[in-house]
Amino acid sequence: MTELEKMNDPALQEYYLQLVRHYEKFQAQKLKLNMSRGIPGPDQLDLAAGLLDCINQTNYKAADGTDCRNYGGVDGLPEAKELFAQLLEAKPAEVIIGGNSSLNLMNDLIIRAMLHGLPGSETPWVKQPQVKFLCPSPGYDRHFAICEHLGIELIPIKYQHDGPDMAQVEQLAAADASIKGIWCVPKHSNPTGITYSDAVVKRLAAMPVKAPDFRIFWDNAYTVHHLTDTPPRLLNMLAECKQAGQPDRVFVFTSTSKVSLAGAGIAALAASEANINWFKKHLGIQTIGPDKLNQLRHVRFFKDRAGIEAHMRKHAAIIKPKFDLAIAIMEAELGGKNLASWSKPQGGYFISVNTLPGCAKKTVAKTAAAGVVLTSAGATFPYGRDPKDSNIRLAPTFPPLAELKQAMELFTLCIQLASVEQELEKRGLRQ
Ligand code: PMP
């Protein structure tokens, strides 16, 4: 039972008036804050300032003498492949270095699968009557957008505490040859914050699938983005797929967007050598070579996995207080009222909040009307349709603490307002 259901009608109406008065004070402040996307703050970008000084007019050659200013090296500098092989627990031969965006790699990969087919495909995907992807939800809206844009049908899959509902995934993937893929953010997931359990990883690697060219899109965007000193461990999906006799089943993605510079980082792909050779063949048509100077800068700045991990501890020192503040305000304002629940992530960039069913859209609209933009309600579900209208993704990293405090106070107030309005409507006390 919610706190509101326990109130009699006059008490509920009085409480509503109090909330409205409080909300009007927020409106008078004319706030202008945006918390809609997971963006690093400028102080986080400053941590990578040295990256810009790692090369100069005379010092631009890779370890093997490659002149990084020139064309070539389509799959990446050897030392960049070595660095990302460490990060992705793969062999350098199983890695391709991309441009500045992993989303770009995912998008291009799926377009190539549509136009040309993947290793194991009977036809290019576009020649099939329908292509479908499994979408554990709430999930990352831009994954869903890539598929939607290409006419790929999105099938929502429920999340459990340790990953997608595997019974549902196994049943669908085994029965339907038009299901070609599943989107996974396996560590500090966007937005739920969960990390997939060993059992889920092993079941995904080994499950029977009907499509001969089924792939797991393993977006390990938050692989080193921890908020604690004891982060959860994620099994190596590439190794698990090999062990299960399905070496080609997975494409692993990551980037340094939230490690170095969000607009000028480096993305990478890891996969079996068969998948990598296929990707390289298509990449060679698209470009003569990537920005190797940026690769060189990253290798010189971070050196190795340990260098990246040490750097990420500096990020955590900046953003953990923001997560702590956001959660403390929700606990203070909403704790014990049964009006919402929220994740307490151990890493990543988001807090996932669930309001009472039917209250998410209203909450986000009220927050926006008082000057704080959040991720659209529904965005975390395929086609923007949250069946319960309950999930809201909070991105607390960008605003400074003082602004985050204002935004969270407004947000928690709007959750209460939306919940009270719904309760008043239920009782016929409000139209
Ligand atoms: N994957 C996930 C799960 C993300 O949350 C993000 C950024 N919000 C991206 C990919 C985008 O990565 P990139 O900057 O490498 O394109």
Image (tube, rainbow, N blue to C red):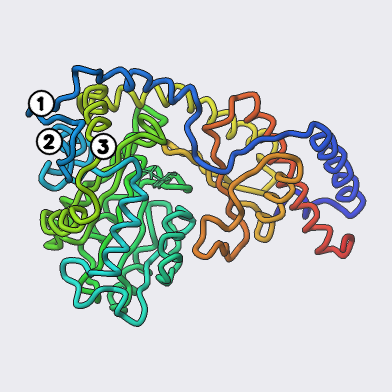
- Assess whether mark 1 and mark 2 are in contact (beta carbons under 8 angstroms): yes
Q: Which residue is drawn at 34% across and 35% down?
A: 265
Is residue 314 toward the left or the right of residue 56 in the image?
A: right
Which sits earlier in the primary sequence, circle 3 or circle 2?
A: 2
Q: Is mark 2 on a helix, strand or loop?
A: helix
Residue at the (41%, 35%) spot, across then down: 262
Q: Which of marks 1 and 3 is in front?
A: 3
Query: Separation of disc 1 and disc 3 at Cα?
Result: 16 Å
Residue 175 seen by the camera: no
Q: How many numbered discs, if any?
A: 3
Left or right for 369, reference 82: right
Q: Residue at x 30, y 43 (%)?
A: 254
Q: Looking at the image, which is closer to me, 409 or 271? A: 271
Give SS at disc 1.
loop
Q: Name the residue under label 2.
A: 78
The quadrant of the rendered image in which ligand 1 is seen is top left
What distance separates the C-alpha of mark 3 from that of mark 2? Answer: 14 Å
Q: Which mark is first along the chain, 3 or 1? A: 1
The spot of residue 252 in percent (x, y) is: 25, 50
Q: Which amino acid does label 2 sit on?
A: Pro
Q: Which of 351 and 378 is in front in this view?
A: 378
Q: Name the residue beneath numbered marker 3.
A: 291
**Kind of residue indicated by mark 1:** Ala
Q: Which residue is drawn at 64% across and 52% down?
A: 355
